[in-house]
């Protein structure tokens, strides 16, 4: 799986914070400064969709105050964009936080307390897997046991970073064998297959965003090219990206994922067939037990 | 050739249990959004910032905490705290959490957890469930090896109907409790899981977990968890119509609780209600009469509901009249008043007081409609229908006679007597 450096688009007037952001992002992100709201949509469109956008939600508001309406427009135009709001003390900020959450901002950096490289790095890490996780909450209407949901959440966060089954086990502080056993008992596909599904779901979510090209989506999700993504989609839903876009990519892929989950669950619930009787015991009465007490 | 005896595992060696990963986030789009939704104004903002401070601090290994927060952040937070001047119950915990910003590497995890727990308790009293859950979780994140803190998160998540999240925290509690030998938390986590499955209607799972809780509590001689587990198992078996088994559990719960336990009246009420549904009104009436005066204020409407129904069915007009007056005296805002009115209507119908039955049934229907209680509305309409058809009402009066004699009935009378004696002894204490 490819794990390219992701773009980090920054629209913020505070130079000290920008420098802090650059240090925190290095080397996983490539920081890119955006001068104003007008330039931001083009920057988001041309950047790979797995990037992160860090904005000052009050940027350019001056004496008017309040949240910038351009941020709302951006989130409507690019619903799959991962946007982090970074702000310091503003009058009435605690009302605005709720609004930002409703608009689709996935994380907040509180510059008053968290203006350090370590804190900013943590916040960026937390933001990465968030969009797919919230989509899973909304889109996958399967009642999971708690353990299954925890594995699914971790897989959703891991796939945004790029990782393998062993990384998923490490993220959950489990051995690969335990993770495999827990996946089976929770009615989930095996870890490797689960991560394949997560990548496809992430790709489907990005395909639903009209601002993203197929190649950008493929590269952002760790596929080597748009052909690789096309093959993966054909393997699951027998459709290419264009058809999938027309039919609602996330809806179609999530429905296929729910079917796959049902199949995994059936495999857990149905008892395995008894092993065939071969050799010297074939055709003879089964031995019950050697212990007389048990026979009784 | 000498026989090789395989070495058995030494008894002191403990099996390693995996602690399951918990779910840390609910459906809210931003971390801690529930706090801002429940606690309005600047104090909500301060709580939200403090919560995020703790979760960030807890997510970083102790060796990496020194450069976590910006210089001057503590002074700024303390200035905000002084400017807002929150309630005294919050002031000290928030000051402790502000101290994290100044010297994060030197902060004591147990003190941070205590501060978060106090804020969670404050939120619980205010009915701010999301805030309670978030701070309980922050406390558990600060001290990740403490099963009691994990149990508090599991319970808070269960009360908010976030069942997968609650399940992961309760399983975590079980694993942690087993590691440190905290058998009280271990039993209570299984009880909490059982209650959660009862709420979801998954009775076989509930039974399995509650039986584990009961076994563990009995093995360790923990009276309270033993009583709680047996009480909940009684509910499960009664729901599954396993009358004899349910009764055995009720007797075990009664013995484990003892006369002075505050949950004894609730158990007596639950047992009485099951007897009412079985038509054993005489036993139910004696238990309700002893239990209702000791029930907690918010359970009073339910207690009086049972009392009215049983008194009506037994033809005890004086008791019914007194209960009728009490039920009408409850405010319309009181939870359970609509249920109480339905039962009062049934009791009145049993006594042949059809006008009163109709009056109570109509009031119950109106209240249930107003409060969106569909099941109560359905019950009220059924009662009204039966009142309109007098013939049916008289038939139900005949059916209200005690059920057929059996071995169960004899034990019911004995159990009822035990309940009355325990409740009276508790009242004397």
Image (cartoon, rainbow, N blue to C red):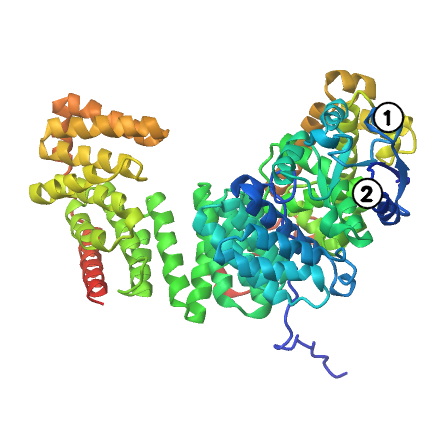
Tell me if I can see residue B16 in this picture.
Answer: yes
- At a point 67% along the width and 34% down the height, the residue shown is A100
Q: How many marks?
A: 2
Outermost residue toward the front in this view: A63
- At a point 66% along the width and 38% down the height, the residue shown is A264
Q: Answer whether labels 1 and 2 touch (C-beta < 8 Å).
A: no
B276 left or right of A80 in image: left
Which residue has dot 2 on it? Answer: A161
Q: Which mark is residue A19?
A: none
Q: Position of residue B273 (x, y in %)?
A: 26, 45
Q: Which of A71 and B366 is in front in this view?
A: A71
Q: Position of residue A11 (x, y in %)?
A: 83, 35
Query: Which element carries disc 1, helix, strand or loop?
Result: helix
Does B385 sit above or below residue B114? above
Tell me if I can see residue B137 in this picture.
Answer: no
Outermost residue toward the bottom in this view: B2
Which of the 4 quarters of the picture holds residue B220? bottom left
Which residue has dot 1 on it? Answer: A39
Quadrant where the N terminus of chain B is found in the figure = bottom right
Q: Which of A13 and A173 is in front in this view?
A: A13
| Same chain check for tags 1 and 2 | yes
Q: Where is residue A25 in the image (x, y as percent from the top left)?
A: 86, 46
Does A279 sit above or below residue A214? below
Chain under callout 1:
A
Q: Position of residue B38 (x, y in %)?
A: 52, 41
- At a point 67% along the width and 36% down the height, the residue shown is A134
């Amino acid at each position: 799986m490819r794990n390219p450096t992701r773009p980090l688009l920054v629209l913020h007037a505070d130079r000290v914070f920008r420098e802090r952001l650059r240090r925190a992002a290095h080397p996983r992100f490539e920081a890119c400064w955006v001068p104003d709201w007008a330039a931001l949509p083009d920057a988001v469109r041309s950047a790979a969709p797995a990037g992160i956008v860090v904005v000052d939600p009050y940027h350019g508001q001056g004496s008017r105050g309040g949240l910038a309406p351009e941020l709302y427009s951006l989130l409507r135009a690019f619903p799959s964009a991962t946007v982090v709001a970074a702000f310091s003390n503003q009058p009435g900020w605690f009302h605005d936080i709720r609004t930002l959450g409703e608009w689709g901002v996935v994380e907040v950096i509180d510059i008053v307390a968290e203006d350090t490289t370590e804190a900013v790095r943590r916040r960026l890490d937390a933001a990465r897997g968030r969009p797919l996780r919230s989509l899973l909450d909304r889109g996958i209407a399967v009642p999971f046991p708690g353990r299954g949901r925890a594995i699914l959440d971790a897989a959703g966060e891991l796939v945004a970073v790029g990782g393998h089954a062993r990384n998923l086990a490490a993220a959950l502080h489990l051995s690969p064998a335990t993770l495999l056993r827990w996946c089976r008992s929770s009615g989930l596909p095996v870890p490797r297959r689960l991560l394949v599904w997560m990548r496809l779901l992430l790709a489907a979510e990005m395909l639903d965003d009209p601002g993203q090209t197929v190649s950008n989506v493929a590269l952002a999700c760790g596929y080597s090219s748009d052909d690789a993504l096309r093959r993966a989609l054909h393997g699951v839903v027998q459709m290419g990206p264009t058809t999938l876009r027309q039919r609602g990519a996330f809806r179609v892929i999530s429905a296929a994922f729910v079917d796959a989950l049902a199949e995994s669950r059936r495999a857990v619930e149905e008892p395995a067939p008894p092993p065939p009787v071969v050799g010297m015991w074939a055709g003879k009465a089964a031995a019950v037990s050697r212990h007389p007490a048990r026979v009784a | 050739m000498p026989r090789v005896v395989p070495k058995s595992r030494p008894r002191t060696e403990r099996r390693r249990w995996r602690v399951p990963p918990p779910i840390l986030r609910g459906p809210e789009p931003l971390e801690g959004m529930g706090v801002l939704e429940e606690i309005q104004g600047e104090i909500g903002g301060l709580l939200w910032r403090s919560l995020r401070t703790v979760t960030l601090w807890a997510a970083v290994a102790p060796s990496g905490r020194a450069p976590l927060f910006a210089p001057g952040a503590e002074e700024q937070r303390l200035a905000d705290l002084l400017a807002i001047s929150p309630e005294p119950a919050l002031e000290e915990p928030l000051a402790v959490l502000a101290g994290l910003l100044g010297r994060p590497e030197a902060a004591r995890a147990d003190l941070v957890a205590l501060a978060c727990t106090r804020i969670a308790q404050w939120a619980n009293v205010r009915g701010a469930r999301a805030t309670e859950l978030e701070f309980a979780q922050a406390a558990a994140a600060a001290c990740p090896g403490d099963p009691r803190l994990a149990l508090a998160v599991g319970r808070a998540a269960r009360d908010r109907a976030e069942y997968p999240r609650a399940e992961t925290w309760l399983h975590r509690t079980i694993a942690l409790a087993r590691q440190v030998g905290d058998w009280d938390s271990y039993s209570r986590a299984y009880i909490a899981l059982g209650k959660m499955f009862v709420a979801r209607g998954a009775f076989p799972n509930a039974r399995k977990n509650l039986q584990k809780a009961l076994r563990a509590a009995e093995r360790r001689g923990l009276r309270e968890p033993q009583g709680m587990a047996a009480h909940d198992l009684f509910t499960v078996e009664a729901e599954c119509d396993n009358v004899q088994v349910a009764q055995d559990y009720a007797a075990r719960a009664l013995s484990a609780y003892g006369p002075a336990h505050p949950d004894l009246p609730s158990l007596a009420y639950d047992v009485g209600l099951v007897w009412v549904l079985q038509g054993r009104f005489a036993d139910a009436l004696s238990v309700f009469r002893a239990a209702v005066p000791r029930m907690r204020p918010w359970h009073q409407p339910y207690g009086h509901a049972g009392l009215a129904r049983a008194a009506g069915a037994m033809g005890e007009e004086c008791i019914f009249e007194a209960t009728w007056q009490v039920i009408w005296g409850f405010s319309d805002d009181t939870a359970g008043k609509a249920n109480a009115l339905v039962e009062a209507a049934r009791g009145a119908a049993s006594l042949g007081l059809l006008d009163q039955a109709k009056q109570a049934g109509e009031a119950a229907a109106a209240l249930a409609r107003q409060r969106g209680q569909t099941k109560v509305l359905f019950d009220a309409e059924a009662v009204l229908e039966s009142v309109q058809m007098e013939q049916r009402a008289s038939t139900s009066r005949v059916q209200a006679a005690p059920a057929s004699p059996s071995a169960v009935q004899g034990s019911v009378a004995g159990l009822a007597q035990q309940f009355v004696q325990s409740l009276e002894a508790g009242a004397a204490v």
